[in-house]
Amino acid sequence: MELYIKHTIVACLITCFSFSQSKINNFLKPSDTLNTSRRNTVVISEASVAALTLIGLNQLWYADYPKSKFHTLNDNSEWLQMDKLGHVYSSYQLGRIGADMLAWSGVRKKDQLIYGSTIGFAFLTVVEVFDGFSEEWGFSWGDMAANAMGTGFYVGQELLWDEQRITLKYSFHQTEYAQLNPEKLGDGLSQEFLKDYNGQTYWLSLNLHSFFKDSKIPKWLNVAFGYGADGMISGNNETDNEAIVYQEPYRQYYFSLDVDLTRIKTESHVLKTVFNIFNVIKIPFPTMEFNDKNGIKLHAIYF
């Protein structure tokens, strides 16, 4: 009798789990036609998150620095353009998420591109205006151009191929430079992940099968070309910082393999969603590095 009860409980738990998973799977499945309820939820959610984020930035970040009259700043030569690639990447990924959310609600493709993919550019433009009124920074036309490039890179591929054959990805590893200037490069992994340009790498990840449709190349296999920089302790404009004397900045170029997680075949919309989220990160692989300082350098596994 006791064994029967145990089996009954296990069977009930499995049934409940399967039912719950099925409900989640149906919820995550994109709508074939316009789902007004979903669309309204997406619009309200995105507007709310954007508004709260901007309010948070204004109160928690910009409030620590003195205000000024609106002014511009030419920072195009800073950080060997790593900060500009960060803008391209952010605008691209925010636009991709915006378009995917509208696709989930059944919005037509044209409106996905007009209203979804441009959300990153719109959000980052407001942030740039905040910079313009901050004495610490300034409105950067270089940043604006980078934001436009990120959005254009997403929209252009959708218009040309109706898919993202080339994905922008990101990878990071900790470096020794952050401890030399933690205020600018971050103090601890959570800050360095965003601030330490020495440890960041931005990738163009090309899906091979999408360019060779009739080939037997695995649909998920990508080749990736990366760009990074090293030897940077502070920005070029920070002449008052003694650390700049010890800087030996140089550019790094990478070649590696990658995986397009969104092209792994599965019927589970839960897994598809998980793959879509983590596809912003470059999968660690053996990598070849080229730079002016050390020539060619091989990495067994590169993050």
Image (cartoon, grey):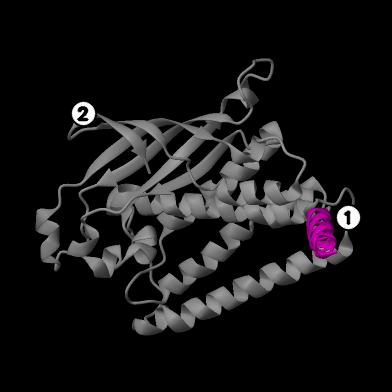
- In the depicted view, which residue is nearer to us: 217 or 73? 217
Q: Circle 1: is it few (<14), some (14-19), or many (20+) Cα within 10 Å? A: some
- In the depicted view, which residue is nearer to us: 158 or 142? 158
Secondary structure beneath label 2: strand
* Cα–Cα span, label 1 and label 2: 54 Å
Image marks 1 and 2: residues in contact by CB distance under 8 Å: no
* Residue 252 part of the magenta-drawn span: no
Left or right: residue 13 compared with residue 263? right
x 49%, y 69%: residue: 127
Residue 292 location in percent, x, y? 20, 33
Q: Which residue is mark 2?
A: 295
Residue 254 location in percent, x, y? 36, 33
Q: Earlier in the sequence, mark 1 or mark 2?
A: 1
Q: Main secondary structure of the magenta part?
A: helix
Amino acid type of the residue that numbered disc 1 sits on in the rendered structure: Leu
Residue bounds of the magenta highlight? 1-26
x 40%, y 61%: residue: 140
* Residue 22 part of the magenta-drawn span: yes
Quadrant location of the C terminus in the rendered image? top left
Quadrant location of the N terminus in the rendered image? bottom right
Return the mark for residue 133. Answer: none
Q: Which residue is mark 1?
A: 34
Amino acid type of the residue that numbered disc 2 sits on in the rendered structure: Gly
